[in-house]
Amino acid sequence: MKRIMTIQDISCIGKCSLTVALPIISAFGVETAIVPTAILSTHTQFQGFTFRDLTDDLEPIKEHWKKEGFEFSAIYSGYLGSERQIEIVRDYVRTFRGKDTFTIVDPVMADNGKLYAGFDDHFPEKMAGLCREADVILPNLSEAALMLGVPYPGEDASPEVTKELLKGLTKFCSGAVVITGVTLEDGTFGFMGFDGKTGTHFEYGNPKVPFKSHGTGDIFASTFTGALAKGFTVLDALKLAADYVTACIRNTYEDQNRVNYAVNFEEELPWLMERITSNRSINNPAERR
Ligand code: PXL
Protein backbone atom coordinates (compact mmCIF):
# COMPACT_ATOMS: atom_id res chain seq x y z
CA MET A 1 0.00 0.00 0.00
CA LYS A 2 1.23 3.49 -0.78
CA ARG A 3 1.92 5.77 2.16
CA ILE A 4 1.49 9.52 2.04
CA MET A 5 2.29 12.12 4.68
CA THR A 6 0.09 15.10 5.37
CA ILE A 7 1.13 18.00 7.59
CA GLN A 8 -1.55 20.37 8.90
CA ASP A 9 -3.63 21.18 11.97
CA ILE A 10 -6.44 19.35 13.68
CA SER A 11 -9.48 21.59 14.04
CA CYS A 12 -11.62 19.53 16.39
CA ILE A 13 -14.81 20.97 14.88
CA GLY A 14 -14.66 22.46 11.41
CA LYS A 15 -14.34 19.61 8.87
CA CYS A 16 -11.09 20.95 7.46
CA SER A 17 -7.36 20.14 7.41
CA LEU A 18 -6.62 16.74 8.99
CA THR A 19 -10.22 15.85 9.80
CA VAL A 20 -10.97 15.78 6.08
CA ALA A 21 -7.54 14.72 4.77
CA LEU A 22 -7.48 11.53 6.84
CA PRO A 23 -10.87 10.10 5.78
CA ILE A 24 -10.61 11.23 2.16
CA ILE A 25 -7.10 9.98 1.46
CA SER A 26 -7.85 6.73 3.33
CA ALA A 27 -10.90 6.25 1.06
CA PHE A 28 -8.46 5.86 -1.84
CA GLY A 29 -6.89 2.87 -0.10
CA VAL A 30 -3.75 4.79 0.72
CA GLU A 31 -2.04 4.86 4.13
CA THR A 32 -2.23 8.37 5.55
CA ALA A 33 0.51 9.36 7.98
CA ILE A 34 -0.43 12.56 9.77
CA VAL A 35 1.75 15.27 11.25
CA PRO A 36 -0.55 17.42 13.42
CA THR A 37 0.89 20.91 13.70
CA ALA A 38 -1.64 22.29 16.19
CA ILE A 39 -4.93 21.42 17.86
CA LEU A 40 -7.68 24.01 17.65
CA SER A 41 -11.13 23.75 19.23
CA THR A 42 -12.60 24.86 15.89
CA HIS A 43 -11.21 26.32 12.67
CA THR A 44 -10.32 29.99 12.83
CA GLN A 45 -13.60 31.20 11.32
CA PHE A 46 -15.16 30.86 14.77
CA GLN A 47 -14.63 33.46 17.50
CA GLY A 48 -12.69 32.38 20.61
CA PHE A 49 -11.04 29.23 19.24
CA THR A 50 -8.33 27.59 21.35
CA PHE A 51 -4.92 26.86 19.79
CA ARG A 52 -2.40 24.37 21.14
CA ASP A 53 0.82 24.75 19.20
CA LEU A 54 2.54 21.40 18.53
CA THR A 55 5.70 22.87 16.98
CA ASP A 56 7.90 21.30 19.69
CA ASP A 57 6.66 17.83 18.74
CA LEU A 58 7.47 18.13 15.05
CA GLU A 59 11.21 17.64 15.30
CA PRO A 60 11.01 14.48 17.48
CA ILE A 61 8.33 12.99 15.19
CA LYS A 62 10.61 13.59 12.20
CA GLU A 63 13.63 12.08 13.95
CA HIS A 64 11.70 8.97 14.97
CA TRP A 65 10.32 8.44 11.46
CA LYS A 66 13.80 8.89 10.04
CA LYS A 67 15.18 6.26 12.39
CA GLU A 68 12.40 3.86 11.41
CA GLY A 69 13.16 4.46 7.73
CA PHE A 70 9.60 5.33 6.69
CA GLU A 71 9.16 6.28 3.06
CA PHE A 72 6.40 8.33 1.46
CA SER A 73 5.06 8.47 -2.08
CA ALA A 74 3.64 11.95 -1.45
CA ILE A 75 4.01 14.76 1.05
CA TYR A 76 1.07 17.15 1.28
CA SER A 77 1.09 20.26 3.47
CA GLY A 78 -1.91 22.45 4.26
CA TYR A 79 -2.66 25.03 6.96
CA LEU A 80 0.48 25.85 8.97
CA GLY A 81 0.29 27.98 12.08
CA SER A 82 3.53 29.98 11.94
CA GLU A 83 6.62 30.86 9.91
CA ARG A 84 8.61 28.44 12.07
CA GLN A 85 6.27 25.64 11.04
CA ILE A 86 6.82 26.51 7.38
CA GLU A 87 10.56 26.06 7.94
CA ILE A 88 10.00 22.73 9.66
CA VAL A 89 7.82 21.50 6.80
CA ARG A 90 10.56 22.43 4.37
CA ASP A 91 12.89 20.32 6.47
CA TYR A 92 10.41 17.38 6.43
CA VAL A 93 10.23 17.60 2.65
CA ARG A 94 14.00 17.65 2.28
CA THR A 95 14.37 14.76 4.71
CA PHE A 96 11.70 12.43 3.32
CA ARG A 97 11.57 13.30 -0.37
CA GLY A 98 12.64 10.23 -2.32
CA LYS A 99 13.20 9.83 -6.04
CA ASP A 100 9.48 9.31 -6.71
CA THR A 101 7.98 11.38 -3.90
CA PHE A 102 5.43 13.93 -5.04
CA THR A 103 5.23 17.15 -3.01
CA ILE A 104 1.96 19.07 -2.82
CA VAL A 105 1.80 22.45 -1.11
CA ASP A 106 -1.59 24.01 -0.50
CA PRO A 107 -0.62 27.48 0.75
CA VAL A 108 -3.65 27.77 3.04
CA MET A 109 -3.78 31.24 4.56
CA ALA A 110 -6.53 33.42 3.07
CA ASP A 111 -9.96 33.75 1.55
CA ASN A 112 -11.95 36.65 0.09
CA GLY A 113 -8.71 38.62 -0.22
CA LYS A 114 -7.98 38.48 3.52
CA LEU A 115 -5.43 36.55 5.56
CA TYR A 116 -6.92 34.21 8.17
CA ALA A 117 -6.77 35.28 11.82
CA GLY A 118 -3.30 35.09 13.33
CA PHE A 119 -1.18 35.58 10.18
CA ASP A 120 0.85 38.72 9.60
CA ASP A 121 1.82 40.37 6.32
CA HIS A 122 5.12 38.43 6.06
CA PHE A 123 3.38 35.08 6.03
CA PRO A 124 2.54 34.94 2.29
CA GLU A 125 6.18 35.52 1.37
CA LYS A 126 7.27 32.64 3.62
CA MET A 127 4.58 30.41 2.15
CA ALA A 128 5.78 31.31 -1.33
CA GLY A 129 9.21 30.07 -0.21
CA LEU A 130 7.72 26.69 0.69
CA CYS A 131 6.06 26.53 -2.74
CA ARG A 132 9.55 26.32 -4.23
CA GLU A 133 9.81 22.79 -2.83
CA ALA A 134 6.58 21.64 -4.46
CA ASP A 135 5.69 19.63 -7.56
CA VAL A 136 2.18 21.06 -7.39
CA ILE A 137 0.79 24.14 -5.62
CA LEU A 138 -2.93 24.73 -5.09
CA PRO A 139 -3.62 28.33 -4.00
CA ASN A 140 -7.00 30.01 -4.28
CA LEU A 141 -7.21 33.48 -5.85
CA SER A 142 -6.59 35.25 -2.52
CA GLU A 143 -3.50 33.18 -1.77
CA ALA A 144 -2.14 33.58 -5.29
CA ALA A 145 -2.52 37.38 -5.14
CA LEU A 146 -1.01 37.62 -1.63
CA MET A 147 2.04 35.53 -2.55
CA LEU A 148 2.59 37.69 -5.63
CA GLY A 149 2.03 40.92 -3.69
CA VAL A 150 -0.68 42.10 -6.11
CA PRO A 151 -4.20 43.32 -5.28
CA TYR A 152 -6.89 40.69 -4.80
CA PRO A 153 -8.82 40.55 -8.09
CA GLY A 154 -12.10 39.50 -6.46
CA GLU A 155 -13.91 36.21 -6.60
CA ASP A 156 -15.06 36.82 -10.17
CA ALA A 157 -11.59 37.47 -11.57
CA SER A 158 -11.62 37.24 -15.35
CA PRO A 159 -9.84 34.28 -16.99
CA GLU A 160 -7.21 36.75 -18.31
CA VAL A 161 -6.42 37.98 -14.81
CA THR A 162 -6.26 34.41 -13.48
CA LYS A 163 -3.86 33.50 -16.29
CA GLU A 164 -1.63 36.44 -15.31
CA LEU A 165 -1.59 35.18 -11.73
CA LEU A 166 -0.66 31.70 -12.96
CA LYS A 167 2.19 33.12 -14.96
CA GLY A 168 3.42 34.96 -11.87
CA LEU A 169 3.25 31.83 -9.73
CA THR A 170 5.60 29.94 -12.02
CA LYS A 171 8.44 31.85 -10.40
CA PHE A 172 7.67 29.99 -7.15
CA CYS A 173 7.01 26.54 -8.56
CA SER A 174 8.49 24.92 -11.63
CA GLY A 175 5.97 22.06 -11.54
CA ALA A 176 2.21 22.49 -11.89
CA VAL A 177 0.65 25.69 -10.56
CA VAL A 178 -3.10 25.47 -10.09
CA ILE A 179 -5.48 28.17 -8.90
CA THR A 180 -8.68 26.79 -7.41
CA GLY A 181 -12.09 28.40 -7.11
CA VAL A 182 -11.99 30.35 -10.36
CA THR A 183 -14.60 31.24 -12.97
CA LEU A 184 -13.76 29.99 -16.45
CA GLU A 185 -14.50 31.51 -19.86
CA ASP A 186 -17.71 29.49 -20.26
CA GLY A 187 -19.00 30.62 -16.84
CA THR A 188 -18.29 27.32 -15.09
CA PHE A 189 -16.44 27.25 -11.79
CA GLY A 190 -13.35 25.17 -11.17
CA PHE A 191 -9.59 25.41 -11.50
CA MET A 192 -7.07 26.80 -13.95
CA GLY A 193 -3.48 25.63 -14.12
CA PHE A 194 -0.18 25.71 -15.91
CA ASP A 195 2.26 22.84 -16.11
CA GLY A 196 5.78 24.24 -16.16
CA LYS A 197 7.22 20.88 -17.25
CA THR A 198 5.15 20.62 -20.43
CA GLY A 199 4.37 24.32 -20.90
CA THR A 200 0.66 23.58 -21.15
CA HIS A 201 -2.39 25.40 -19.78
CA PHE A 202 -5.31 23.41 -18.49
CA GLU A 203 -8.66 24.17 -16.88
CA TYR A 204 -11.82 22.43 -15.82
CA GLY A 205 -15.10 23.55 -14.28
CA ASN A 206 -18.57 22.51 -13.24
CA PRO A 207 -21.78 24.57 -13.24
CA LYS A 208 -21.52 27.00 -10.35
CA VAL A 209 -23.55 26.34 -7.21
CA PRO A 210 -24.47 29.65 -5.53
CA PHE A 211 -23.08 28.60 -2.17
CA LYS A 212 -19.72 29.04 -0.46
CA SER A 213 -18.43 27.33 2.62
CA HIS A 214 -15.24 26.54 4.52
CA GLY A 215 -12.90 23.60 4.12
CA THR A 216 -13.57 23.03 0.43
CA GLY A 217 -9.96 23.83 -0.49
CA ASP A 218 -8.77 21.14 1.93
CA ILE A 219 -11.25 18.64 0.45
CA PHE A 220 -9.95 19.52 -3.01
CA ALA A 221 -6.28 19.10 -2.04
CA SER A 222 -6.93 15.85 -0.14
CA THR A 223 -8.86 14.31 -3.04
CA PHE A 224 -6.14 15.38 -5.45
CA THR A 225 -3.43 13.83 -3.25
CA GLY A 226 -5.32 10.56 -2.83
CA ALA A 227 -6.06 10.29 -6.54
CA LEU A 228 -2.47 10.97 -7.47
CA ALA A 229 -1.25 8.28 -5.08
CA LYS A 230 -3.82 5.94 -6.64
CA GLY A 231 -2.23 6.45 -10.06
CA PHE A 232 -4.44 9.14 -11.61
CA THR A 233 -2.62 11.64 -13.83
CA VAL A 234 -2.26 15.15 -12.40
CA LEU A 235 -5.09 16.44 -14.61
CA ASP A 236 -7.45 13.52 -13.87
CA ALA A 237 -6.73 13.85 -10.15
CA LEU A 238 -7.54 17.58 -10.31
CA LYS A 239 -10.77 16.90 -12.20
CA LEU A 240 -11.86 14.29 -9.70
CA ALA A 241 -11.09 16.76 -6.88
CA ALA A 242 -13.20 19.45 -8.58
CA ASP A 243 -16.09 17.02 -9.12
CA TYR A 244 -16.04 15.79 -5.54
CA VAL A 245 -15.94 19.32 -4.10
CA THR A 246 -18.87 20.23 -6.36
CA ALA A 247 -20.79 17.17 -5.16
CA CYS A 248 -20.12 18.17 -1.51
CA ILE A 249 -21.21 21.76 -2.12
CA ARG A 250 -24.38 20.71 -3.96
CA ASN A 251 -25.27 18.28 -1.21
CA THR A 252 -24.83 20.98 1.45
CA TYR A 253 -26.68 23.63 -0.54
CA GLU A 254 -29.69 21.32 -0.82
CA ASP A 255 -29.60 20.39 2.88
CA GLN A 256 -32.13 22.40 4.94
CA ASN A 257 -30.34 21.35 8.13
CA ARG A 258 -26.80 22.19 7.05
CA VAL A 259 -24.21 23.60 9.43
CA ASN A 260 -22.79 26.99 8.56
CA TYR A 261 -19.11 26.15 9.05
CA ALA A 262 -18.41 23.30 6.58
CA VAL A 263 -19.80 21.05 3.83
CA ASN A 264 -21.38 17.58 3.98
CA PHE A 265 -18.34 15.77 2.57
CA GLU A 266 -19.22 12.59 4.46
CA GLU A 267 -22.45 11.98 2.54
CA GLU A 268 -20.63 12.12 -0.78
CA LEU A 269 -17.83 9.70 0.20
CA PRO A 270 -19.69 6.70 -1.29
CA TRP A 271 -19.93 8.61 -4.59
CA LEU A 272 -16.21 9.41 -4.42
CA MET A 273 -15.38 5.76 -3.83
CA GLU A 274 -17.37 4.76 -6.89
CA ARG A 275 -15.57 7.38 -8.94
CA ILE A 276 -12.22 6.07 -7.76
CA THR A 277 -12.88 2.82 -9.57
CA SER A 278 -15.23 3.88 -12.38
CA ASN A 279 -15.18 7.19 -14.15
CA ARG A 280 -18.66 8.58 -13.76
CA SER A 281 -19.40 12.12 -14.75
CA ILE A 282 -20.81 14.40 -12.07
CA ASN A 283 -22.99 16.37 -14.45
CA ASN A 284 -25.12 13.57 -15.83
CA PRO A 285 -27.88 12.99 -13.23
CA ALA A 286 -28.49 9.53 -14.62
CA GLU A 287 -25.00 8.61 -13.52
CA ARG A 288 -25.46 9.97 -10.01
CA ARG A 289 -27.13 7.79 -7.41
O1 PXL B 1 -9.77 25.17 5.62
C1 PXL B 1 -8.63 25.87 5.86
C2 PXL B 1 -8.31 25.97 7.32
C3 PXL B 1 -7.54 25.00 7.91
N1 PXL B 1 -7.19 25.06 9.21
C4 PXL B 1 -7.63 26.07 9.98
C5 PXL B 1 -8.41 27.08 9.44
C6 PXL B 1 -8.77 27.03 8.07
C7 PXL B 1 -9.60 28.07 7.48
O2 PXL B 1 -10.14 28.92 8.11
O3 PXL B 1 -8.84 28.08 10.21
C8 PXL B 1 -7.24 26.10 11.42
Image (tube, helix red, strand yellow):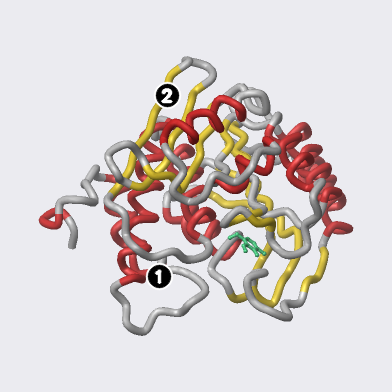
Residue 102: give its label. none
Residue positioned 59% across, 76% down in the render: 13
Q: Is residue 110 above or below residue 135?
A: below
Viewer-closest of 56 and 98? 56
Residue drawn at (30%, 45%), measured in percent from left and top? Answer: 188
Considering every residue shown, the one lying at the far top of the view is 198
The residue sitting at 48% across, 77% down in the picture is: 260
Q: Residue at x 14, y 57 (%)?
A: 285
Going by the image, does 265 lie left or right of 186?
Answer: right
Could you tell me the amino acid type at mark 1?
A: Asn
Q: Earlier in the sequence, mark 1 or mark 2?
A: 2
Tell me where residue 278 sits by quadrant. top left
Q: Which residue is mark 2?
A: 201
Is residue 90 rendered to the left or right of residue 265?
A: right
Image quarter of the C terminus: bottom left
Q: Residue 288: percent from the left, percent from the top?
A: 18, 58
- Rendered view: 197 above or below 79: above
Q: Are marks 1 and 2 in contact (CB under 8 Å)?
A: no
x and y, in percent, of residue 219 in the image: 48, 56
Side of 84 where 27 appears, left or right: left
Please state which of residues 279 and 81 is positioned toward the viewer in this rendering: 81
Q: CA distance from mark 1 to mark 2?
A: 31 Å
Q: Where in the figure is residue 22, as x and y percent of width and height?
A: 55, 59
Label 2 amino acid? His
Q: Residues within 10 Å of mark 1 (few under 14, many from 20)?
A: some
The answer to whether 208 appears left or right of 104 in the picture is left
- Tag 1's secondary structure? loop
Question: Residue at label 1?
Answer: 264
Residue 201 position, x and y percent, is 42, 24
- Kindly tell me whether residue 193 is visible in this rendering: yes
Q: Residue furthest bottom?
A: 257
